[in-house]
């Protein structure tokens, strides 16, 4: 029978406040010892870990909650370990998956592991004295192990009936269209051994992860009890979902990555700006470090006037600064200003394509910008599809509604030259306040 909450001497007030803070933010889904975990954490600094499979050369938004959980624990004085799964990534976690993943080559995995290592340095402090973060690769201890060693030392401690009872296994075995290979079935054993190894080397006593990792976490705790006779702990956070139940971080164009070369700072910023009112409060709590007072002020302001979207703007600022730094945030805000009318200059084709991804474009020969003094503004508006005829284009220009690179064109006789290009090959035309089109000159 589980004992009641124990009395303990609190060495650091942050230790005692951490779990209360996590609960307020909605970051605790399950724990292995709800009654005693707060007191256990308050006794002394603890070492904890979370694992990340290197299935791509970048983390994505779905990885943020466990990664930020490590960050929150470190800022409260505990020591975080980020485990990049160079070994487990070769198999693929069956948790939450309806079918087996394609296995990556060793070269791809090595490339992905190196990229993830660099990304994690943005979120964790590796120069914080006794609670400095550690970055490790489980291939370093699993790779040298022989199959016979694995069966003898680890496999014998896993009752098959316990493994079959795990949700991640049962859900796949119950499907008629796909089953579960022995390779995936073994994933749980490998990940469980990570916990034992990290306990042995770092005295790591707590594993955190998403709620879909509960089966893997408890398997590691059970293995440590059988192999070392020690009680370890687990804590899961909810998966990051929208109010309609769908995963957050998925867009029409695909996954929202943390790497700038996969999802630009502008695209990243725009995702959070567009978060629905029903979801933005949860995101502010779960993903940012804003104070309770500020978040509650934003809640109140949103209830009073949701159209201002102050919560979304604050969320976008915090998330983009966190992932892309101040330069990335400044670039994203500048790009946003451009879309809403700021004059355009000193950008390249790629940046303009990101900002105006959904804007129609037409291609013209570059020599039209040089012939006869340049391209007439009325011809440009017609070519871009912003005017039905030259007469329509003249009226738009005369009424002050014609813009090139968000600069108003005053005269219907104005001609556009290569000096009017906003980037290497692109010119941005606008009719009125919101009707944009691109002209590309090759």
Image: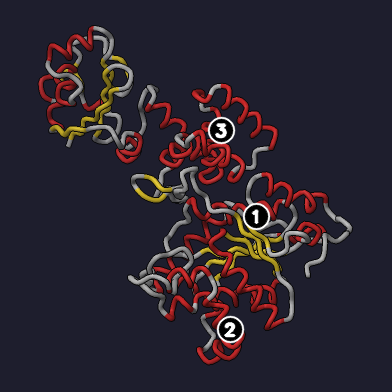
Residue 158 x, y percent position in the rendering:
59, 83
Residue 273 x, y percent position in the rendering:
47, 34
Please state the total of marks drawn on the protein image: 3
Of callouts 1 and 2, the N-terminal one: 1
Of callouts 2 and 3, the N-terminal one: 2
Is residue 272 positioned above or below 413 on the image? Answer: below
Mark 2 → mark 3, Cα distance in angstroms:
49 Å
Mark 1 → mark 2, Cα distance in angstroms:
39 Å
The quadrant in which the N terminus is found is: bottom right
Q: Report the side of 315 relative to 366 (left or right).
A: right
Q: Report the side of 111 relative to 164 (left or right).
A: left
Q: Is residue 374 visible?
A: no
- Residue tagged 1: 125
Circle number at residue 159: 2
Residue drawn at x 64%, y 77% is 197
Circle number at residue 314: 3
Between tags 1 and 3, which lies in front? 3
Mark 1 → mark 3, Cα distance in angstroms:
24 Å
Residue 46 x, y percent position in the rendering:
74, 63
Q: Can residue 355 be seen in this view?
A: yes
């Amino acid at each position: 029978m589980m004992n009641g909450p124990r009395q303990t001497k609190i060495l650091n007030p942050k230790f005692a406040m951490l779990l209360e803070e996590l609960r307020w933010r909605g970051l605790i889904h399950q724990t292995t010892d709800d009654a005693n975990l707060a007191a256990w954490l308050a006794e002394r600094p603890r070492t904890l870990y979370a694992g990340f499979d290197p299935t791509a050369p970048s983390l994505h938004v779905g990885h943020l909650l466990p990664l930020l959980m490590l960050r929150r624990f470190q800022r409260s004085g505990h020591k975080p370990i980020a485990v990049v799964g160079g070994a487990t990534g070769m198999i693929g976690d069956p948790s939450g998956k309806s079918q087996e993943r394609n296995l990556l080559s060793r070269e791809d995995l090595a490339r992905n592991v190196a990229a993830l290592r660099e990304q994690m340095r943005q979120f964790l402090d590796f120069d914080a004295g006794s609670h400095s973060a550690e970055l490790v690769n489980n291939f370093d201890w699993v790779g040298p192990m022989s199959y016979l060693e694995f069966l003898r030392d680890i496999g014998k401690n896993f009752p098959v009936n316990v493994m079959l009872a795990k949700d991640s296994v049962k859900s796949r075995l119950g499907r008629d269209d796909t089953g579960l290979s022995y390779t995936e079935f073994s994933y749980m054993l490998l990940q469980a051994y990570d916990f034992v190894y990290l306990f042995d080397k770092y005295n790591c006593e707590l594993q955190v992860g998403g709620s879909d990792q509960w089966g893997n976490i408890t398997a590691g705790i059970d293995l440590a009890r059988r192999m070392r006779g020690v009680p370890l702990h687990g804590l899961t956070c909810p998966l990051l979902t929208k109010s309609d139940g769908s995963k957050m971080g998925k867009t029409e164009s695909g996954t929202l990555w943390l790497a700038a070369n996969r999802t630009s700072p502008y695209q990243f910023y725009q995702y959070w700006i567009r978060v629905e009112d029903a979801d933005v409060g949860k995101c502010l709590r779960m993903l940012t470090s804003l104070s309770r007072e500020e978040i509650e002020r934003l809640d109140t302001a949103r209830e009073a006037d949701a159209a201002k979207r102050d919560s979304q703007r604050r969320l976008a600022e915090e998330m983009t600064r966190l992932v892309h730094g101040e330069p990335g945030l400044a670039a994203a805000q500048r790009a946003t200003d451009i879309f809403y009318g700021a004059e355009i200059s000193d950008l390249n084709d790629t940046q303009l394509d990101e900002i105006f991804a959904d804007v129609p474009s037409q291609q013209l020969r570059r020599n039209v910008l040089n012939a006869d003094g340049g391209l007439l503004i009325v011809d440009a508006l017609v070519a871009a599809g912003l005017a039905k005829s030259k007469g329509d284009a003249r009226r738009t220009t005369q009424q002050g509604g014609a813009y090139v690179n968000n600069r108003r064109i005053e005269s219907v006789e104005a001609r556009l030259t290569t000096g009017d290009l906003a980037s290497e090959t692109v010119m941005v035309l606008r009719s009125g306040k919101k009707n944009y089109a691109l002209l590309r000159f090759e």
